[in-house]
Image: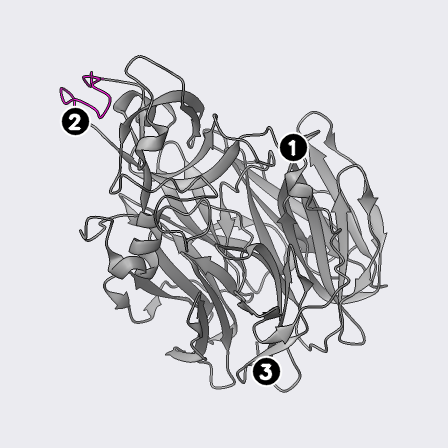
Amino acid sequence: MRRTLLAAAAALLAGTLHGMPATAAPAVPDTDVRAAAVSTPLTYRVFATREGLVGGTTANGHVIKPNDHFVALPSRSALSPAGSTAKSVKVCGPSSCETAPVWDVGPHNTKDNYWDANREMFKDLPQGRPEAQAAYQSGYNGGRDEFGRTVPNPAGIDLADGTFYGIGLRDNGWVTVTFLWTTGGTGETPAVSLQSSPTVQYGIQMQVYGRAANGHAYGNVYTPGKSWTGWQDLGGNLTGRPTAVEYGSQLQVFGRGPDGATYQRVYTPGTGWSGWTNLGGNLAGDPAVIVYDTEQYGTQLQIYGRAANGQVWSRVYAPKSGWGGWYSLGGNVTGAVSLVQYGTQLQVFGRGADGGTYGNVYTPGKSWTGWTNLGGNIAGDPVAVLYNTADYGNQLQIFGRTSGGAVWSRVYGPKSGWGGWYSLGGNVTGAVSLVQYGTQLQVFGRGTNGATYQNVYTPGKSWTGWQNLGGTIAGDPVAVEYDTAQYGKQLEIYGRGAAGVTWSRVYTPKQGWSDWYSLGGNLTL
């Protein structure tokens, strides 16, 4: 699964981006920080299936044994000779990692070296995106593999039984794969879990969601080569902002109804959209949804939200058991909660009436810790992010806005624990939005003048200070990373104008920032 980090797409034609001229002074340094460690192997988040086939023979002549340890990749260019570990991968699942050789070819394709910049086939797909995933999720190549067969799942790797179960999988699911013979990686680990957002990359598409005054949810979809669809009415009767998340091969949209219940609508490839389903509950704040990878229960879908009395409630979907009932985590928070999977833990953060940030941590086998006061004095909802660093490991960082408009942060490091609160300065209103872009951490917020402001942390260079990116938006900005085949990893900002129109600005590594452009629409949230 990927980071909880997402975006809307842009097309550059004759030096323009979505038809808008690219500007010359990007707030991100011109030097691509992702190219700093050219000897670092490439790492991608892909869907894994169990190979099985005990007693069969692999593409290199190996006879598959019970509890065997190897993987299959969909290109013969990665195949090692039998008994050789010349080309191996490090594959990480819900509980652990394993290094295994590539001894078979598949799944689905035989010429899809998706990890390479120069692909043998499917050259219009982004690097790191298996053709089967694009076919299954977005209908790429008519939903078929290189042989014309309908793709039944989005798998980009097959795992032998010993590897499959050894890394904690009990059913097919998302894993992190490092291609150990490659170079050009960044050391950045793709996010293990993903919190829902109004913007989401689904396959090769960028999708943006919002609510109109009539309570209906609307979606606008960008497909490379086809531009935006325009706003599509998904119906419903929501109050607050809809939020979307990719779960397996599905895209799921959630929102809160006027009765306090959480409603869900699901898009399944080949089937289309379901109707709206009432999942019950009685929330006073918008639901937040996260995909949580577990060893024991597989990849779960978890909903969290605040009730009128300040307690946080949750409901959990597990692949084999379906939806559980709503249960309370207690607490007394105000505003929206923020969710992060940190290692095997799930962590929930919220703002107390006293302005303190409170955290509640679930550890498998130990249940919830209860709410802990992490201090601080913020007036905006806290936003938590997992930040992968080369020097300090996977950090957990919390950001929030004070009543004076300054943004404050607190950082947890694996070896050092929690640091103290520190100020990034600024004068923003509303909630901030966070993105890890390459090795950088970028923070976005809306100024009192309606402009979007950006502050960028680059390892070894500290924060840039707040940069004015212009624009005039009335809603909080949402920043996302969008992985494209043609333009690399773009950074995109979306925000709602006073007239309900959605506006966007796009950063492309070689072009810098585009001008602001309109997606149209008439949204209230």
Per the image, is 19 magenta?
no
Q: Earlier in the sequence, mark 1 or mark 2?
A: 1
Q: CA distance from mark 1 to mark 2?
A: 39 Å
Judge whether residue 51 can be spotted in this image: yes
Q: Is residue 12 left or right of residue 118?
A: right
Q: CA distance from mark 3 to mark 1?
A: 41 Å
Q: Does dot 1 land on a helix, a strand or a loop? A: loop
Q: In x, y percent, where is residue 420? A: 81, 39
Q: Residue at x 58, y 29 (%)?
A: 40
Which portion, as a residue range, is magenta?
A: 54-66
Q: Is residue 272 left or right of residue 122?
A: left
Q: Classify mark 3: residues with Cα within 10 Å, few (<14), some (14-19) or many (20+).
A: some
Q: Which residue is mark 3?
A: 501
Q: In x, y percent, where is residue 281? A: 43, 62
Looking at the rendered structure, the kind of residue marked 3 is Val
Q: In which quadrant of the rendered image does the C terminus lie?
A: bottom right
Coloring basis for residues = one colour
Q: In x, y percent, where is residue 401? A: 77, 59
- Please state which of residues 8 and 489 is positioned toward the viewer in this rendering: 489
* Circles 2 and 3: CB atoms closer than 8 Å: no
- Please state which of residues 224 and 358 is positioned toward the viewer in this rendering: 224
Q: Nearer the viewer, mark 1 or mark 2?
A: 1
